[in-house]
Structures are given as C-alpha cells and as structure tokens.
Image (spheres, rainbow, N blue to C red):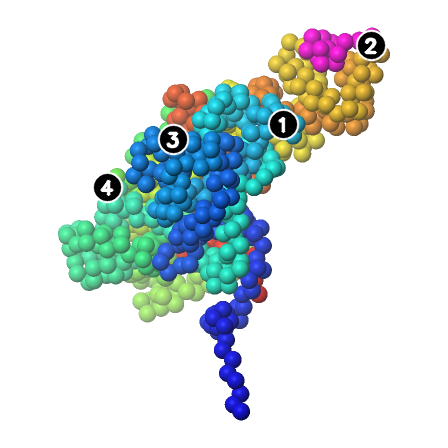
C-alpha cells in the first residue's frame, strides 16, 4: 500500500514561502498589540495619529495595505444592519465630519448637494434613507467615508461624547466653564450648540484641531465613550483583519522599516521649488556656465555629466533642469547629491572660518573696530538685521541705539573695551545664528557670485594665524576638496624667493603640516610644529595677496550653494505655511531630527515666543490659551512659580481681576463634602449663616476669612491650590492670570522657563502654539508681520541643522528603521 500524500493547506504553504523569503523572520498572527499602531513616533512619521492610516493612504498597486483594502472592510460592514444604527447615533451625537463625508458620498451618486444633505438628515432622524443601499454598495461612494476614517483624529469621538454629555446635563459631564472654554477655543459662542447643524459645525471645527497644546480641547478627548461608534468599530475591524493575516503583518513591518515620509516631503519640496524663477537662478549659479566656462567645474561637473553627458553649453540648462526634476523623486543619488550641500562636510572650511571669526569678535577689540569700520560696506541689509535681532536689545551698549550711532561712537573713540566687546558679541551672535548674515560677507545674493568684503579680507589672515582649527580646515580643503586652490597655492609656495618647499615635496609637506596641526590640537598645545607654523604663515600671506580670490570662491561655493538651497525651501514654505507645519509634525518625532527641533524650540524662545503667546492670551484669545495648556502643568510642577501665583490669588482684594480666580477655585473645592463641611464650620464661627456660595458672590472679606481658616488644613490647601491652576488651564480665567504674569517680572521669568520646558517635553507643542498665534489678533498688521518673522525663523532653524540632512542622506528613514526593530515585538 502506497503512503498517502498529504497536501499542505494554502495558508500553510503561504507561511512556508514567507518564512523562506524572509530568512529568519517568522510572523505569527495576532501577536501585535494595537498600542504599536498608536505609537506617536511611528504614527507621526506618516503625519497621522495611527500608523495604519498613513500606510493605507500611501499604499500603491504593489501593496496589500492600500485604500481599496479599507474599502473592502468598509463595504462588508455597511451591509450589516448595525452599521446604519451606529451611523445614526453618531450623527445625532453631532459628528459633523461624518455628516460631510456621507454628503460627499451621496453626491458621488449623482444627486445634487441639497438632496445629498437631505439624505444625511433623514438618515440621522430615521436610521435609514432612500439612497442608503446605493451608497453602501458603491465602492466609489464609500471612498468619501474612507477619507473620513483616514483623516479624523482618534480622540475626536471622545470629544463628541463630552459635548453630548454637556448638552444633556449628564452628571458625568465636564464643568460648564471647561466646555465654554473649549467652545471659545473653537472660535464659537460659549454656549451649548442648538440644533443638529450647529452641533455638526462645532464638531467639524473640533476635528481640525487636536489637543497638541494640552488645554480644554485635549481634556475633551479623554472623555469616556459610553457606547460603540462607527469610527472606532471600523478601525477595530481593520486592525483585526491586519493582525490575523500574516502577509499583512509582514508588509506592515516591512513598510515601516523603509518609511521615508519626511525625506520624501523634503525632496518633493525641493523638486517643486526648482520649477520656479528661484530654481532657475539656483541652477544657473550652481553650474556657473558662461562664455569662458562652457562646462561646469568641480563637483557641479559630476552632476552635469550625469544629467546631459559631457556636452557643453548653457543652452542645455533647460534639459538638465527637466531631467533633474524627474530624477529627484526616482533616484536617491540625485537628491542626496544636492542635499549634501546642506551638511557639515560641505562647509568644512567655511564653518571653521565662521567659528574663528565669531570667537575673535567676542575676544579681540581690534577685530571689533575693524568690523565697525568696514563690515557695512556693500551690506545694506546687515544693519537692519542687527537692529532687529534679539541680541541688539539685550546688549547694554546697543540697546536703544541705531547701528549708525554705534559706528559714529566707534570712529570717535567713545567706546571702551567692554562696550566694544559687547557690540562684537552682538555681531558675533548674528553671524553665528544667521546663515544669511554670514553668507552676505562674501556672496552676492542676487547674482550668486563671490563678493569681496573689505572686513573679511582684513581679518582672514589673522583668523588663520590665531586659530589652529581654521588653519587645519583650510589645509584639508587644499588637499582634498579644492584642486584649483591646491595648484595655485603650490605654485606660489614653490616660486617664492628662498622657498623651502620644492614642487615634488609640496603635497607631502602639506600632509606633514596637517599631522603637526592635529597633534597640537589633540594636546591642546599653543606651540605648533615647524612645518605647521610655516604653513600658517605662508597661507595667511598668500590669502592676503594673490590667493584671496580663490578663497572667496571657495567660501562662495561652500556657503552660497547651501544658502541658495535653503532659500528655495524657505520660499516654498513661506508661500504655504500649512504644508510646512504638516511636515513639521513628522519631523517632531523623527529620531534623527531631534537637534533640528531643539533648534526650532530655541528659536521660538529667542524670538520672544513665550511672551508673545502670553500677550495673545491676555488679549482674550482662548485658542492660544488652549494651545499653551501644557505650560500651566510646568508651572504647577515648579514649587516657586506655583507659590507665586497662589499667593497672588490668595491676597488679591475683592476688586482685583484675580478675585474671579479665587472665587471659582473655591467653588470647585467646595464640591467635595469634607471641604464644604470644613468651610461651613469656619463660616459659623464668624457668625455667617447664609449659604457659602452666596458669601462667595457677595462678601469678599468674609470669603477670605473663611478661606484663610480652611487653608490651615493640608488636604484643603492642596485641593484649593490645584483648583487655582485647573480653573486657569481649563476654565475661563487664563486671560486674567496672563495679565497678572505680564505685570510681574519674576512671574514672567517663570512663565518663560515653563514654556521652554513644555517645548522640550512635548514635540508637537511648538506647532500648536505657533499655528494658533499666527491666527490670533486677526487684522493687526504688526502682529501678522511679527508672526511671519517668527515662522520664518523657525523654518530657517530647521533648514540650518546640518545633522538632520546628514542623517537623512545616510539613513533615508531618519532613524525610523532602527526604532521599528526595537518597538515591534514580532520574532
């Protein structure tokens, strides 16, 4: 009898194939927790609040996880009776985003917009409508509902339950002051929405604003859901379908390992920017083709030949631009080639020179005098940049004066050493922080050509002589990065009278001098070796004579190209700030963008962001107040700042604006039975027999006497102090407290420190507060201009972080691949 042949099941065969194809990776169904999908690092890298959303949105024909996969799950569920019941309850609860999605779905069925809206209203009233079957079986129509699922925040359903509980006076509802503050934050009247359309409108505004700031809107997203919702049910079904299907699980992990959403966004921004007048100017400057140079030289030559071959002539520029635009998104090599100019190695000599100049301006009054004499020549914008910088107003020598007045004082000898070094520190801070100001010393921004600065020419030899790091950077540039300067310096060096270096020994001599410079730097020794000292003296002399033009050209190539690239990004982002802030959401959680986001946070603080936000709150802008909710948490965690505010509220009189904070906080505490009993006891001891709430409203003196007695109880005091912060954060008292903080220097300093701490601990806080601030004080031109400058400074801080670009070139995922391997527990 022949042994029977047992055939493997289809699923077992598929698992075997996957195991072979994936090496040691064995995927088991049902092993992945949904918490992984909600991980902010993984979710925000695709600009969503859960990972599966952006994986579906970005899926293409080669992927299983794509929009039509979710459509299939959606269509299967819509055929069930429970789907219309869930949708009806959500619509009646006020889900305006779902109402709009269904309206668009009905419109796809070729009915008018009015009829489509009537169908949605009928569905909300009756639980069914005439066109429901047509909608629930049409893949094109349910695409609108799918878009609702992919774009709606995960906390949105909970917020709808919070509003519904408030409307129906549910005992578990949040206090009315919290809900009214939330309505004000949505720029709606502080009252319960009346009617279905009003509820839908409030919900639609709620769906576009997350709880990134940590105020009342975030609190709404924590409200418990008392029943299932259509949104949550669909995502539960989608997640279950994913984890029970090994091929889908494998694709989920693999696509995360190669996630490069932020990099793709940056490259796409560059691609779009090249298709502009500024892009044409950049490529013309980059390739530098003219009558004398029909083909590019140096690094640009490699790119040119990769695009159009060894052919020559400026007439090929349009062809080169067209090919480059198409290759940027399809071949990583071309994007990496251009983005390399934004990294540290691309500006090695320029950055060393910059650091040396900044140090000299802070330490050497002779360098400062030269700066005040000649740094302004050909620099019309530099004086304005200095006067507008935050360091100008912080320096005692420059505060309240113009750049022209400082120059005149210097020329008359009226500035002592401390004043000179103070002015030098201001100039150094600007050159250190502003790439645009630094670049203006040697680049003509209009033409993209070298610009000879008398100031830089006068101090450059000194920088090489006194800063070994600067000398070493230029030596390495001669040896490895600039063949033209290497040859020119060699000819000059070997042709001098009594030359010690012969032509054959030139390159070895440079290498020996470099080794001696490195040894001196490693030992932190001020004494250089003989060859190193000879190089420093010779190079500084060559730079002040025939070599200056080549040095300028090198600085222009290193810094000018990077500056023009940054300007391309900046122009695109300034034209569409919303696109920038969407992209920033992905960068904020990207492991390799940590330093860039820290620079952005430092920029916001340096440009007065904390005080500007406080001024907006004091101007009764509840949207900004909601965005700054996390700052109150940081203030509460600081015992000194907490005591300062609590004491100010406690000792305010009945006519003070802070009296409202005291009364509201006390009312909240008295809702606890033990606290009310304690307050009744002290009221009776004072001979007060009226209701406590009436005393709070009518008798400020008695209120403070009762409160003073109650605060001797540690439990009451802790609850009351916490209530002060809660009514400020979630209630309507934040503008009053903001006005008080602005009037007290120590309180303002505490606010700034707490603001900076919130920026550090919450990645999306910066986006929340700046976006809300940009929309505050509508119609005020001065405020709008201030906010545009602030946004541009933050954009520039991101662009000038060289580490970000280096990481994105080396690891296209920005560190996400490493994070995925550590996070997703699939063996």
- Residue 435 picture location, percent across and down: 39, 41
- Mark 3 against mark 4, which lies toward the viewer? 3
Nearest-to-viewer mark from 4 and 2: 2
Q: Residue beneath label 2, please? A: 686
Residue 185 seen in this snapshot: yes
Q: Which residue is drawn at 56% across and 52% down?
A: 34
Does residue 531 show up?
A: no
Residue beneath disc 4: 277
Frontmost of labels 2 and 3 is 3
- Residue at 56% x, 25% y is 167
Q: Distance between the residues labelled 3 and 1?
A: 30 Å
Residue located 69% across and 22% down the image: 668
Residue 768's spot in the image, x, y percent?
A: 49, 35
Mark 3–mark 1 contact, CB under 8 Å?
A: no
In the figure, 502 relative to 788: above or below?
below
Above or below — where is 519 with respect to 383? below
Marks 3/4: CA distance? 49 Å
Q: Which of marks 4 and 2 is nearer the N terminus?
A: 4
The residue labelled by disc 1 is: 170
Q: In this view, does 211 lie above or below 315?
A: above
From this viewpoint, which residue is outermost toward the bottom? 1
* Secondary structure at numbered mark 3: helix
**Above or below for 332 versus 726:** below
- Counting residues from the start of the chain, the first of labels 3 and 1 encountered is 3
- Magenta range is 686-703
Residue 483 pos. (x, y %): 30, 60
Residue, disc 3: 118
């Amino acid at each position: 009898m022949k042994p029977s042949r047992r055939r493997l099941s289809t699923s077992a065969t598929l698992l075997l194939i996957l195991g072979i194809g994936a090496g040691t990776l064995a995927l088991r169904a049902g092993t992945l927790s949904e918490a992984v999908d909600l991980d902010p690092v993984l979710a925000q890298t695709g600009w969503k609040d859960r990972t599966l959303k952006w994986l579906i949105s970005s899926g293409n024909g080669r992927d299983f996880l794509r929009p039509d996969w979710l459509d299939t799950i959606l269509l299967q569920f819509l055929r069930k009776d429970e789907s219309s019941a869930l949708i009806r309850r959500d619509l009646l609860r006020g889900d305006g985003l779902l109402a709009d999605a269904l309206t668009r779905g009905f419109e796809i069925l070729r009915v008018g917009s009015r009829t489509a809206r009537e169908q949605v209203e009928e569905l909300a009233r009756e639980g069914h409508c005439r066109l429901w079957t047509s909608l629930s079986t049409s893949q094109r129509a349910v695409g609108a509902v799918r878009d609702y699922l992919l774009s709606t925040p995960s906390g949105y359903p909970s917020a709808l339950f919070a509003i519904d509980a408030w409307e129906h006076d549910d005992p578990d509802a949040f206090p009315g002051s919290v809900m009214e503050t939330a309505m004000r934050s949505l720029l709606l009247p502080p009252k319960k929405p009346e009617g279905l359309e009003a509820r839908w409108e409030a919900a639609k505004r709620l769906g576009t604003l997350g709880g990134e700031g940590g105020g009342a809107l975030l609190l709404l997203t924590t409200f418990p859901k008392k029943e299932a919702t259509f949104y949550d049910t669909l995502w539960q079904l989608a997640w279950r379908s994913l984890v029970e299907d090994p091929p889908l699980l494998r694709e989920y992990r693999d696509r995360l390992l190669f996630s490069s959403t932020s990099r793709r966004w940056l490259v796409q921004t560059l691609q779009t920017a090249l298709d502009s007048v500024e892009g044409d100017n950049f490529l013309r400057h980059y390739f530098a083709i003219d009558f004398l140079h029909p083909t590019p030289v140096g690094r640009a030559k490699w790119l040119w030949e990769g695009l159009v071959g060894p052919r020559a002539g400026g007439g090929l520029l349009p062809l080169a631009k067209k090919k480059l635009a198409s290759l940027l998104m399809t071949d990583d090599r071309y994007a990496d080639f251009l983005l390399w100019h934004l990294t540290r190695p691309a500006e090695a000599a320029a950055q060393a020179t910059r650091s040396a100049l900044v140090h000299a301006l802070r330490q050497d009054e002779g360098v400062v005098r030269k700066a005040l004499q000649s740094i302004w020549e050909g620099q019309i914008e530099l004086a304005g940049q200095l006067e507008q910088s935050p360091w100008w107003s912080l320096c005692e020598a420059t505060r309240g004066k113009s750049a022209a007045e400082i120059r005149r004082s210097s020329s008359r000898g009226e500035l002592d050493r401390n004043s000179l070094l103070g002015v030098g520190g201001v100039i150094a801070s600007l050159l250190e922080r502003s790439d645009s100001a630094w670049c203006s010393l040697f680049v003509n921004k209009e033409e993209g050509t070298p610009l000879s600065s008398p100031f830089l020419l006068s101090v450059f030899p000194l920088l090489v002589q006194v800063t070994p790091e600067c000398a070493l950077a230029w030596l390495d540039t001669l040896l490895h990065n600039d063949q033209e300067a290497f040859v020119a310096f060699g000819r000059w060096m070997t042709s001098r009278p009594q030359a010690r270096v012969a032509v054959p020994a030139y390159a070895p001599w440079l290498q020996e001098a470099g080794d001696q410079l490195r040894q001196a730097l490693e030992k932190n020794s001020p004494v250089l070796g003989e060859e190193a000292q000879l190089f420093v003296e010779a190079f500084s002399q060559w730079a002040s004579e025939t070599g200056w033009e080549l040095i300028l050209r090198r600085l222009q190539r290193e810094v000018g190209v990077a500056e023009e690239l940054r300007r391309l990004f900046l122009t695109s982002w300034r034209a569409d700030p919303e696109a920038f802030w969407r992209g920033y959401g992905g960068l904020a959680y990207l492991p390799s963008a940590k330093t860039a986001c820290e620079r952005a946070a430092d920029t916001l603080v340096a440009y007065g962001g904390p005080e500007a936000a406080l001024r907006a709150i004091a101007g009764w802008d509840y949207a900004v107040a909601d965005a700054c909710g996390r700052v109150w948490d940081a203030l509460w965690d600081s015992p000194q700042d907490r005591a300062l505010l609590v004491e100010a509220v406690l000792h305010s009189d009945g006519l003070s604006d802070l009296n409202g904070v005291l009364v509201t906080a006390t009312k909240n505490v008295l809702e606890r039975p033990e606290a009310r009993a304690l307050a009744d006891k002290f009221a009776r001891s004072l001979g007060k027999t009226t209701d406590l709430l009436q005393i709070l409203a009518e008798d400020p003196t008695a209120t403070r006497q009762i409160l003073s007695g109650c605060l001797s109880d540690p439990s009451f005091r802790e609850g009351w102090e916490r209530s002060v912060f809660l009514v400020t954060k979630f209630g309507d008292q934040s503008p009053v407290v903001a006005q008080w903080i602005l009037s007290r220097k120590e309180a303002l300093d505490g606010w700034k420190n707490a603001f900076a701490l919130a920026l550090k601990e919450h990645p999306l806080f910066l986006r929340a507060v700046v976006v809300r601030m940009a929309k505050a004080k509508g119609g005020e031109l001065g405020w709008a201009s201030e906010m545009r400058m602030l946004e541009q400074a933050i954009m520039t801080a991101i662009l000038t972080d060289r580490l970000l670009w280096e990481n994105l070139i080396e690891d296209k995922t920005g560190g996400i691949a490493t994070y995925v391997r550590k996070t997703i527990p699939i063996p």
